[in-house]
Amino acid sequence: MTETIGKPLPRPTAETKTFWDSCAKGQLVYQSCQKCARSQFPPRSHCALCGSDRIVWKKSAGRGKIHSFTVVHRPPTPAFKADVPYVIALVDFDEQFRMMMNVRDTDPHKVAIGQRIEVFFEPMDDGIFLPQARLTG
């Protein structure tokens, strides 16, 4: 019998714990700098623009548009074999931050730059809930 290796899961850190805890509650959050008002993702201890440590978490409405994407036809590991083809997209959220995520529940060949998405959360092992995108309207 061959053992199947599972998909890699995120490992929350001190900087990302708030993000992952929020995902588990069905909320997408991002950081905002109180000094320069820049939104940022991924989470950091300081603003990537001005360097300030005055960072706060804000709740996103979970809506945005596809900035760029690729359709994956070759699984990176055997754990992803059943998923191909699938879409990985860079999403520009309405709150001015960008995030990479899978686009699910659609024909991968019908995804296009500029399409609107909404976020949903997929439960994984170890209490992790992955933010995923689905096309809207």
Image: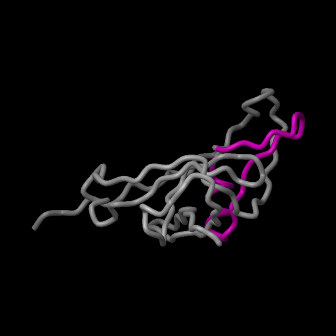
Asked if residue 22 is among those painted magenta in the image, a careful observer would answer yes
Q: Measuring 72% from the left and 57% from the top, which residue is drawn there?
A: 29
* Pick the front one: 105 or 58: 105
For residue 2, what is the image quadrant? bottom left
Q: Is residue 72 left or right of residue 62?
A: left
* Residue 137 at x, y percent in the picture: 65, 72
Q: Is residue 21 left or right of residue 39?
A: left
Quadrant location of the N terminus? bottom left
Q: Measuring 31% from the left and 54% from the top, which residue is drawn there?
A: 73
Look at the image and name its color scheme. one colour
Q: Measuring 71% from the left and 37% from the top, which residue is drawn there?
A: 45
Q: 105 above or below 60?
A: below
Tell me where the magenta segment starts and ends, as one range: 16-41
For residue 34, what is the image quadrant? top right
* Residue 97 at x, y percent in the picture: 71, 46
Q: Measuring 81% from the left and 39% from the top, which residue is drawn there?
A: 38
